[in-house]
Each structure stands twice: as structure tokens, then as C-alpha cells.
Image: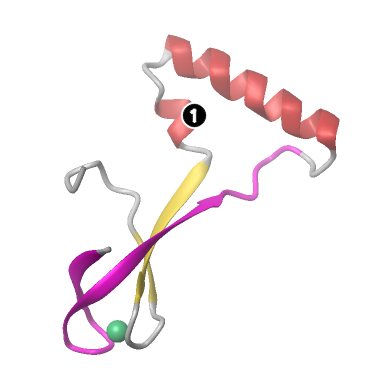
Amino acid sequence: MTMQFCEVCGKATEHKELIKQKPSKYGASRREQLKAFVDGFFSGVGGGGAAAIDLIDRYVVCQECGHKKLENHGEQFQ
Ligand SMILES: [Zn+2]
């Protein structure tokens, strides 16, 4: 849980991190998922992991109002 500013509440509130897999260009079947994983893995190795990270969306959810905010920029709180 992290304290972050929520623009809906207008103050700093507790936020919970939520990781969601992006709806990708690949289908939802098992075989397509595997293909997506393998593609991501190999391009991740080649491109320093950027492609693999690209497959997920990071959100933070305000614990007071439930507002979701996309947080895909960097790892500054790690
Ligand atoms: Zn809020």
C-alpha cells in the first residue's frame, strides 16, 4: 500500500497496486497465450525486458473512492 495523491478525493490517500495483463494482439486461447509469452520472452531478452513489461498495465486504486489510475511509468517506488 502506498500513499498517493488522488485527484478525485483531492488529497493523498492509500492506494493499492493492481497489475493487469493487457489485452494483447494475441488471442485468449492457451496456444495464443503461450505464443505471446514466448514472443515477449525473446524480445524481452533482446530488448532489455522492455517488451515483457509492455504486456502488463500497472494501476493504483484509491482505497477511499476506488478510483483507478494508470501507473505505467517506471519503478520509482520500488
Ligand atoms: Zn480517491
Q: Quadrant of residue 48?
A: top left
User: Magenta segment: does it hold 4?
Assistant: yes
Tag 1: Cα neighbours inside 10 Å, few (<14), some, or many (≥20)?
A: some
Q: Residue at x 74, y 26 (%)?
A: 34
Residue at far front of view: 1
Question: Is 4 drawn above or below residue 57 in the view shown?
Answer: below
Question: Is 13 drawn above or below residue 45 in the view shown?
Answer: below
Using residue 44 as the reference point, say whether residue 31 is left or right of it: right
Q: Position of residue 24 (x, y in %)?
A: 65, 43
Task: Write down the residue under mark 1.
Answer: 52
Q: Position of residue 38 (x, y in %)?
A: 65, 19
Q: Nearer the viewer, residue 1 or 44?
A: 1
Using residue 16 as the reference point, say whether residue 32 is left or right of it: right
Q: Residue at x 64, y 50 (%)?
A: 23
Question: Is 13 drawn above or below residue 75 in the view shown?
Answer: below
The quadrant where ligand 1 appears is bottom left
Magenta region: which residues?
2-26
Quarter in which the N terminus is drawn: bottom left
Q: Nearer the viewer, residue 13 or 74?
A: 13
Q: Quadrant of residue 40?
A: top right
Q: Residue at x 74, y 33 (%)?
A: 33
Quarter in which the C terminus is drawn: top left
Using residue 25 as the reference point, say whether residue 71 is left or right of it: left
Give the secondary structure at mark 1.
helix
Question: Is 8 drawn above or below residue 41 in the view shown?
Answer: below
